[in-house]
Image: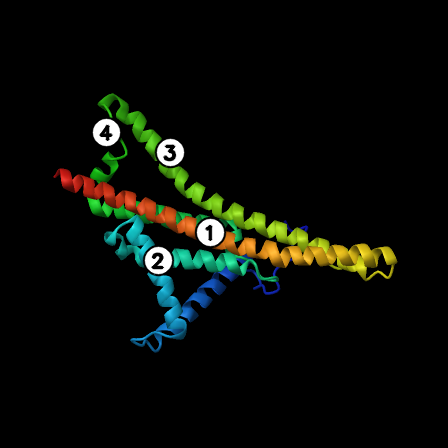
Amino acid sequence: MGAVEHPPIFRLPGIPDHVTYTWLVMVILAGVAFAASRNIQLVPRGVQNVLEVVLEQFVGMIDDVMGREGRRYLPLIATLGLFILTGNLIGLVPGLAGPTANLNTTAACALVVFVAYHWIGVRKQGALTYLKHFTGPVPLWLKPMMFVIEIISHLARPLSLTLRLFGNMVGGHILLAVIFLLMGLDGLIGWALSGSLAGAVVGGIGGAVTIVFTVGFLYPLKILVSFLQAFIFVMLTMLYISGAIEEAEHHADHH
């Protein structure tokens, strides 16, 4: 990765890049939240209007997936979604580093989800009752094996969340880095400026085609992937929490 991608233009001495740009994402989101809430109006406009539309989309998704019971988890779900989306989009800006392209950041987000939905399940049902649902409605002699299978399944969830987001973001950044390397002064553009006729023709046409391809197709595709990966992460988070809530309601109905 380092062979084709230059380090970000802004770095803090002794601080890893993904931590620096995680702080940047936090500053951006805090600034947007402050701008939207400093002068709240009954008829929203400007930043307040935009943020209300975004939060209404989150509320709509929560209602569809979890029901109205899930609205209490809006702060967790919306914060994760906005953080991941902003981190994804920052990575598309030349000279900046997207924090979600680092395994530590995606693992931290996944662990937050993992701890949160188990904590919700334990709080709703109690520790012993929550552990019982890991065995499932199977005969007594199958319960130990089912318990092990369920534990492995739950442990695989944070791993899946981590690697899916990380892999998609890193793959896109590597592709963009390779394209920029091909277009740079050591590539097609440098060849076009070399002064030779062949360089001017082949390098010029190749550079123009590459720029059009990047701006017209690759960047829109990366923006779409950034939104899609944030959506998938949020959707899976809601499904995991919903599973804990439904299990609690299932036990409540039986009692």
The dot on residue 228 is: 1
The amino acid type found where label 4 is placed reads Pro
User: If you read the primary sequence from the N terminus, does the residue marked by circle 1 or circle 2 appear first?
Assistant: 2
Kindly indicate whether the residue at mark 1 contacts the one at mark 3 (C-beta within 8 angstroms): no
Kindly indicate whether the residue at mark 2 contacts the one at mark 1 (C-beta within 8 angstroms): no
Kindly indicate whether the residue at mark 1 contacts the one at mark 4 (C-beta within 8 angstroms): no
Tell me if mark 3 has few (under 14), some (14-19) or many (20+) residues whose alpha carbon lies within 10 angstroms of its own: few
The amino acid type found where label 3 is placed reads Ile
User: If you read the primary sequence from the N terminus, does the residue marked by circle 4 or circle 2 appear first?
Assistant: 2
Q: Residue 9: x, y in percent?
A: 62, 64
Question: Who's the residue at 33% across and 30% down the image?
Answer: 148
Between marks 3 and 1, how big is the CA–CA gap? 27 Å
The amino acid type found where label 2 is placed reads Phe
The quadrant in which the C terminus is found is: top left
Q: Helix or strand or loop: what does disc 1 sit on?
A: helix
Q: Helix or strand or loop: what does disc 3 sit on?
A: helix
Between marks 1 and 2, how big is the CA–CA gap? 14 Å
Kindly indicate whether the residue at mark 2 contacts the one at mark 4 (C-beta within 8 angstroms): no
Q: Which residue lies under the disc numbered 2?
A: 58
Vertical placement of residue 197 versus 155, above or below: below
Kindly indicate whether the residue at mark 3 contacts the one at mark 2 (C-beta within 8 angstroms): no
Tell me if mark 2 has few (under 14), some (14-19) or many (20+) residues whose alpha carbon lies within 10 angstroms of its own: many
Q: Quadrant of residue 208?
A: bottom right
Q: Which residue lies under the disc numbered 3?
A: 152
The dot on residue 137 is: 4
Q: Residue 64: x, y in percent?
A: 30, 51
